[in-house]
Image (cartoon, rainbow, N blue to C red):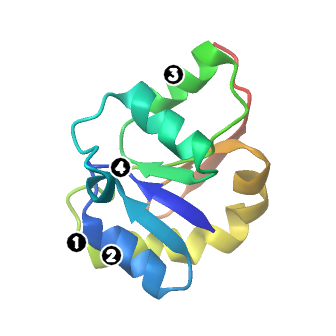
Amino acid sequence: MRFLVDNNLSPAVAKLLTDAGHEAVHLREYGLQAAPDPVVLARARDEDRILISADTDFGTLLAREHADRPSVLLVRRLVGRRAADQATVIIANLPTVEDDLASGAVVVLADDWLRVRRLPLLP
């Protein structure tokens, strides 16, 4: 899978995803660490990447635009944990949500639960 990792997560998450066989890029690699959310969302969409973030604003932006892309994987209750722990939870849950992410969805992922909302979202 192709991922764009938001600046609110460590670049190590992108490296660990890459080490696991995915194509992952952190916003810092593009010099976009201070970019506003619409720019980040557009970058993910333009590169056909799934955005991984802890920022819930992306769901609101997708709903306002009635967008069906890009998919967003929101990590909740994992913020503050080490990058290795975050990546482990993400990688362990990808088989469950892979089809949803490929079709267009917002997936909210925590330690012991996940929620999937298909795109486009209703405002």
Asked which secondary structure carries label 4, the reply is loop
Q: Characterize the local packing of mark 1: few (<14), some (14-19) or many (20 or more) Cα atoms within 10 angstroms.
A: few
Cβ–Cβ below 8 Å for labels 1 and 4? no
- 106, above or below 73, in the image: above
| Residue type, label 1 | Arg
> What's the CA distance linking mark 1 and mark 4?
15 Å
Q: Of the two numbered discs 1 and 3 on the same chain, state the one appearing first in sequence.
A: 3
Q: Of the two numbered discs 2 and 4 on the same chain, state the one appearing first in sequence.
A: 4
Front position in the image: 103 or 45: 45
> Which numbered tag is attached to residue 26?
none
Image point (52%, 22%), residue name: 61
Q: Quadrant of the N terminus?
A: bottom right
| Residue type, label 4 | Asp
> What's the CA distance linking mark 1 and mark 3?
27 Å
In this image, 19 relative to 101: left or right? left
Residue wearing tag 3: 60
Q: Of the two numbered discs 4 and 3 on the same chain, state the one appearing first in sequence.
A: 4
Residue wearing tag 4: 6
Asked which secondary structure carries label 2, the reply is helix
| Residue type, label 2 | Asp
Image point (41%, 31%), residue name: 39
Q: Characterize the local packing of mark 4: few (<14), some (14-19) or many (20 or more) Cα atoms within 10 angstroms.
A: many
Residue wearing tag 2: 85
Q: Quadrant of residue 5 in the image?
A: bottom left
